[in-house]
């Protein structure tokens, strides 16, 4: 079972953390199930960028980004070459390290 290492983030994981999730799970689903309440304003339907993460390790083990995801990522805050929408990035067998950007372009946030 792959491990997702989450780098420190002031709101979601101040000390950083690690969670395990089965291969075939999206990073977003794994984070939510692991108690990391990452934003996902479109309910994981690939229609926004609020679940944007930067994959610092293990990027090549994830499924390839489709054109729709790549088009949306162009609007994400803090875009980097290893950026993915966590709702679309599917875990394989390799461990990954992710950084959750400090900001999103979400204008209205619940809770």
Image (cartoon, rainbow, N blue to C red):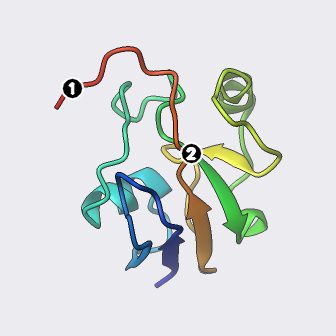
| Rendering coords of residue 106 (x, y %) | 43, 21
Answer with the quarter of the image where residue 17 lies. bottom left
Q: What residue is drawn where x is 48% and y is 66%?
A: 8
Q: Name the image quarter holding the C terminus.
A: top left
- Residue placed furthest toward the bottom: 1
Q: Which residue is mark 2?
A: 101
Q: What residue is drawn where x is 50% and y is 73%?
A: 4
Seen from the viewer's position, the closer of residues 51 and 29 is 51
Seen from the viewer's position, the closer of residues 107 and 64 is 107
Q: What residue is drawn where x is 29% and y is 24%?
A: 109
Give whichever of discs 1 and 2 has the lower sequence position.
Answer: 2
C-beta proximity under 8 Å, tags 1 and 2 = no
| Rendering coords of residue 21 (x, y %) | 40, 74
Q: Which mark is residue 25?
A: none
Q: Which residue is mark 1?
A: 110
Q: What residue is drawn where x is 71% and y is 71%?
A: 57
Answer with the quarter of the image where residue 12 lies. bottom left
Badge 1 local density, few (<14 within 10 Å), some, or many (20+)?
Answer: few
Q: CA distance from mark 1 to mark 2?
A: 18 Å
**Numbered label tally:** 2
| Rendering coords of residue 85 (x, y %) | 58, 41
- In the depicted structure, whether residue 93 falls above or below residue 60: below
| Rendering coords of residue 63 (x, y %) | 68, 56
- Residue placed furthest toward the right: 81
């Amino acid at each position: 079972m792959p491990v997702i290492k989450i780098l420190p983030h002031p709101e979601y994981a101040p000390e950083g953390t690690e969670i395990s999730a089965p291969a075939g799970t999206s990073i977003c689903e794994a984070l939510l199930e692991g108690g990391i309440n990452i934003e996902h304003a479109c309910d994981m339907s690939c229609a926004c960028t609020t679940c944007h993460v930067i994959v610092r390790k293990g990027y090549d083990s994830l499924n390839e980004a489709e054109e729709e995801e790549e088009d949306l990522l162009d609007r994400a805050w803090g875009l980097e070459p290893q950026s993915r929408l966590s709702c679309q990035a599917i875990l394989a067998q390799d461990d990954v390290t992710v950084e959750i950007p400090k900001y999103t372009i979400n204008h209205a946030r619940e809770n």
